[in-house]
Image (cartoon, rainbow, N blue to C red):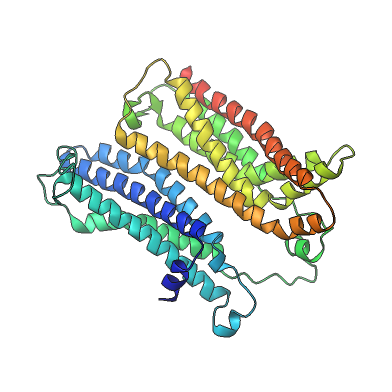
Amino acid sequence: MLALRLARGAHPLVQLRRLLVAGASAGTGFLLLCTLGYAMSHPDASGGAVLRLAWCVAPIAATVYFAVTVARTDPATRPRSGLSAVGLGPARLMVLATISTAVACTLGSMVALLFFLHLRGDLSGLPFDGAGSELLAAGQPLPLPAALTLLALVPLAASAGSAAVLRPRTPKSNGKQDAHHAGPADPNAPAAPPSGLPWGVALLAAGLAVETYASRSPGTPDLRMPGGLTGSPAGVLAGWALTALGLAIAGPGLTFLCGRILQSARPGAMRLLAGRGLQEEARRIGRPLGVLCVVGSGAYAALTLYSGNRPEVGPLTTLGSLLVAGCAVLTLATAAVEAKHARSDTTSALLQLGAPASMLRGTAALRAGTLAAVFGPLTWVVAELAALPLAG
C-alpha cells in the first residue's frame, strides 16, 4: 500500500517513465504470447517455435534493463534524512522500488494479454475483433498456465534486477578508503576508472574472430532470422552476441577515457569541467551508451547486409526492433537525466561563484560532442566488421 501511495504522489515525469516501462512490458509480453500462438498453430514445428522464443530474448533484456534503470533513478528510492526514523531505511526503499517495478511490468503484461485475446477474437465489442485469428490459433483453447508463465518473465526479471541493483551495500573496511567513496568526501579526488574496458575489448575482438571463423566454416547450420532473413550461421550470431556484450561492457571505460582526453594538453576551464564530468558520469551513462551503440551497429549491419535483398519484415519483427531500439534510447535518456540531477549541486555552486550560464551550456555540448565523436565511428567500425563475414 505504501508503494502505491508513493507511486500516486510522484512527479509527472516519474509517472511517465513508469508508463513507458509498462508499455515496453506490454509489447514484450505480446511478442511472447504470439510465440505461444505460433506453437499452438504449428505443433509439428517445435524447432521454429523455440527459435521464435529465442528471438524474444533481446526485447526481454532491453525491457528489463530499461525497467531497472527507471527503478534506480526513481526519487522515491533515494535515501533521505529522517526516513530511517520512520522505518524507511535502504532495505525498505529497495523493497518499495521492487514492488513498483513489479506493478508496472505486471500492468503491461495484463494489457498484452487483453490485446492478445482481443486479436484472437476471445474478447468482443472492440474494433479489430479477431483480426489475428489465423495467426494466433483462435480455434484452439489458450493454455492459461503457459500464457501466464510467459507473461511473468518480464515482471520477475525486472523485479529481481531492481532488487540486485538497489540492495544495500556495506562499504569494505580494509584500512584504506575506497576510491569510489572518496569522491563525495574530496571534491578534488579524481574518480576511479572503470575496470571493464580491457574485458570489453577482449570480448569485442573474440566476437569478431568467432564471426569470421564461423562464416568461413563449411557445413555450419543456418538460423532463420526474424522477417525471413536467412543465411546466418549460428556461429556468426554467437560471435555477434560476444561483440555486443563486449561493446556494452567497454562503454563506461570508453566514457572515462573520453573525459581523460578532454583534460589533456593544458585544458581550459570548459574542457576541464567537461572532462571531469565525463569521468564522474562514466559508470552512470557509459553502459547505456554502449548498449545504444550495440543496437545502432546491429541496425546498420542489417541494413548494409540486406540492402539489395529487400526481405519482407513482418509486424512482429518491426515491433521487436522498435522495442529494443526504443528501450535503448529511453534508458540512455533516463541515465542522462539522472546525471543532470547528480550535477545539480555542482551547477548551482558554479552559478553562485559567477560562472556564466553559456559556459555551462558549452560544457554540456562539449561532453555530448566528444561522446558522439568517439562512439559514432566506433559503432560504424563494429557494424562494418560484423557485416563483413556475412557479406563474404
Identity of the residue drawn at 46% across and 39% down: 325
Q: Residue reaching furthest right?
A: 266
- The answer to whether one can see residue 224 in this image is no
In this view, the residue in front, 170 or 25, is: 25
Vertical position of residue 4 compared to residue 150: above or below: below
In this view, the residue in front, 48 or 206, is: 48
Residue 340 is left or right of residue 291, and the answer is right
Residue 283 is left or right of residue 104, and the answer is right
Residue 266 is left or right of residue 252, and the answer is right
Residue 252 position in % (x across, y down): 66, 46
Identity of the residue drawn at 32% across and 55% down: 109
Residue 65 position in % (x across, y down): 49, 51
Q: Residue reaching furthest left?
A: 139
Vertical position of residue 62 compared to residue 370: above or below: below
Q: Residue reaching furthest top?
A: 308
Residue 352 position in % (x across, y down): 81, 58
Residue 137 is left or right of residue 59, and the answer is left
Vertical position of residue 8 compared to residue 388: above or below: below
Identity of the residue drawn at 53% across and 37% down: 294
Residue 356 position in % (x across, y down): 80, 48
In this view, the residue in front, 172 or 27, is: 27
